[in-house]
Amino acid sequence: MKKEFAVIGLGRFGSSIIKELRELNVNVLAIDKDEAVINDYKDMVTEAVIGNTMDENVLKSVGITNFDHVIVAIGENLQASILTTLILKDLGVEKVTVKAQNDYHGRVLEKIGADAVIHPERDIGRLLAHRLVSAHTLDILEISDDHSIVEFKAIDDFTDKTLEQLDFRNEFGVSVLAIKRHEHIIVSPDANTKIIEDDILILIASDQDLSKFEIVMGDH
Ligand code: ATP
């Protein structure tokens, strides 16, 4: 059975989610308090409703508890984002994902029961900073406050060297979790694995060690 999604708030973020969900061919309910916004997107979704989700009755009237996953993409109005999340969890919606405006907002959302809190602006800012330091950094996934996983495109100097020769762990405190080679992935590569051109290394380390690695390798 298809999963049912509801997206609340169709700003830039919410509207890009509904566009992607449409591509994936899933049922989507969109809610926004602004009629003009709903008119812009109503043809892209299964159902579009004008309503203020700070009002519990609006959420009840659309049968919000029947949805597997609700995404709250209200950004600037913190009160609306927090209250909407609180009502959704009080009504018993199983999975609520909320876009946070900043760290404090994110912490409040976690405390009131949001199942997932996302920080798109912060994450993009982080990735951009890493890419400015090293054009070889392709993506970054924060796994704790001070550790991350990074996708790093191998530089020419790595070619034909084994992981033992490169010795990232001893030199930088950086471990190679996997190597993406064209269509396949080498998981937990051993010390004898040789890097070839166009390999993408999946690295894990503390943010401090990763920064050092990116700065040194960024010079190549
Ligand atoms: P983005 O960066 O994604 O454009 P934003 O951070 O600027 O978004 P807002 O503009 O505050 O976020 O909100 C996004 C959408 O949420 C707007 O279209 C707005 O009408 C809608 N919205 C705000 N408050 C409510 C509410 N209480 N109920 C329903 N929709 C709301």
Image (cartoon, rainbow, N blue to C red):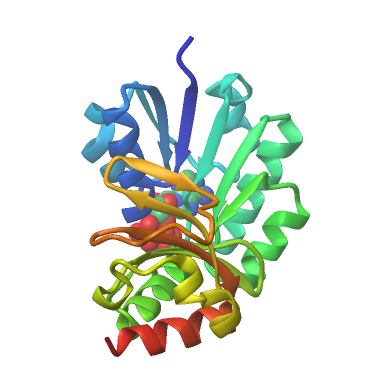
| Visible residue check, residue 123 | yes
Viewer-nearest residue: 178 or 145? 178
Give me the residue at 51% from left, 41% from top. 71
The x and y percentages for residue 24 are 32, 27
**Foreground residue among 209 and 159:** 159
Report x, y in % for residue 5.
48, 28
**Residue 11 visible, this orientation:** no
Residue drawn at point x = 35 percent, y = 32 percent: 21
| Left or right: 56 in relation to 180 | right
Q: Is residue 173 above or below residue 12?
A: below
Determine which quarter of the picture holds residue 106: bottom right
Residue placed at 41% from the left, 54% from the top? 179
Position in image of residue 176 (x %, y %): 51, 63
Q: Quadrant of the C terminus?
A: bottom left
Looking at the image, residue 168 sits to the left or right of residue 108; the answer is left
Residue 50 spot, x, y in % from top left: 40, 35
Q: Is residue 6 above or below residue 106?
A: above
Q: Is residue 15 left or right of residue 77?
A: left
- The image shows a total of numbered marks equal to 0
Image-quarter location of ligand 1: bottom left
User: Residue 64 appears in which quarter of the rendering?
Assistant: top right
Which residue is rendered at x = 49% and y = 20% of the image?
Answer: 3
Q: Residue furthest top?
A: 1
